[in-house]
Image: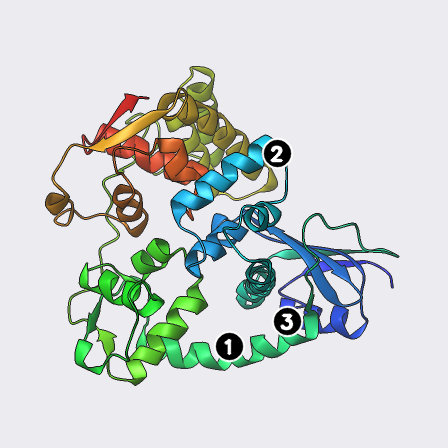
Amino acid sequence: MRGLSGDFSTMPLKDLVVYLGNRRATGSLKVERGDVRKQLELREGHVVSASSNQPREFFGQFLINMGHLTEDQLEKAFSTQAETRIFLGKILVMTGLVPEATVRGTLSHKFREMILDAFHWEDGDFVFEAADTAPEVAGLDVSVELLDVHREGEFRETAWQAIRAVFPSGAVRLAVDERKLPERKPGSMDERIVQLIKDGLTIDGIALALHATDFFLYQRLYALYRLDAVKVSDEPPASELSVVVEEDAEPGIIGSETSSDEVLQAAQLFLDAGNARDGEALARRAHEMSPSPRTAEFVKAAQEKLLVHLRRELSEPPRVPTLQVAPGHLKTLQLSAPERYLLSRIDGRRDVAAIVHVSPLQELDALKFFAGFVDAGLVKLTPR
């Protein structure tokens, strides 16, 4: 079979999956949309390996979401992996933390979710490079048939229509009637969901707290809705306000008549002066004004510089965050779901890097939030 490439506006991923599955394709499939990149290794129409640059699709996140690991256990496993260079799944089996059958099942679940998440993409690009044999896969041998994934995608398309009719967005809060809840065990998924609803989290906030993929959470919420146990709260949807407010880098530099090129020039000046925060913010502004491969590359370079800067500022050497306000006061603040998640993980023991490492957020985004917490006086950092 020959390779092929294209974009999802002309060939949706669900059609591409059927095409490759029917031809029992072997090779590498890369899909991209914006900053999101995924790669699948195929063998005779089966996915045998899958990787993504989205933290929520990392293997460890699925293990936490499904209740097989805690964040602390995952962090310890990461430390062992860094020392031994052994595949994470093998470490978990060798140390007895997770049975091999569970690791295999979770990997299979990850492969499916990574593909199905992209089924709704209306834009983006793909490249399939055919090969005679699939590359050797490190770790456990797990495979998922592409045609099975397509069948699941057809089911979900119908399911999402029903779900969205009840839960229109992740910004809504929920109300729970415990009298109508099914029997649940302590520590079960339903128990955790109910507690997070009581804590006043939005659906987006619940997803972050559970390290859950969207469909996994919404499907369970919809099942509870069908029992009249959960409904959308009458409380207005959560505001998008955040304590991390990005101000214009320099009043007067960015005006209504400023061109994208002028903003890029200003961004470069800030970056050259060592001001990575404002330089990156201006780079993103320029890309929003006039998206192009040139501005996209500039943003990428600016973000790399900002990431280096924030690592030095917040986690090198290790720094332990402590809250400077009472937990009750945090509930009164207009915080975004990611901010609430990160603040809830501050325990006076784990350092910034450890919290970020096991979070379902991009490292740069998480570090930006921590920088905002420090600037706002919500958090103090103490060298370990």
User: Badge 1 local density, few (<14 within 10 Å), some, or many (20+)?
Assistant: some
Q: On the image, numbered disc 2 is attached to which residue?
A: 84
Report the amino acid beneath label 2: Thr
The single residue placed furthest to the bottom in the displayed view is: 227
Task: Please indicate whether residue 247 sits to the left or right of residue 112 in the image.
Answer: left
Q: Position of residue 149 (x, y in %)?
A: 63, 72
Report the amino acid beneath label 1: Arg
Q: Tell me the SS state at disc 2.
A: helix
Task: Please indicate whether residue 186 sits to the left or right of residue 328 in the image.
Answer: right
Q: On the image, numbered disc 3 is attached to which residue?
A: 14
Q: On the image, numbered disc 1 is attached to which residue?
A: 156
Q: Position of residue 223 (x, y in %)?
A: 35, 80
Seen in the picture, residue 108 relative to 333 is either above or below; the reply is: below
Q: Tell me the SS state at disc 3.
A: helix
Q: Give the Cα distance between marks 3 and 2.
A: 38 Å
Task: Look at the image and tell me in which quarter the N terminus lies.
Answer: bottom right
Q: Position of residue 220 (x, y in %)?
A: 37, 73
User: Badge 2 local density, few (<14 within 10 Å), some, or many (20+)?
Assistant: few
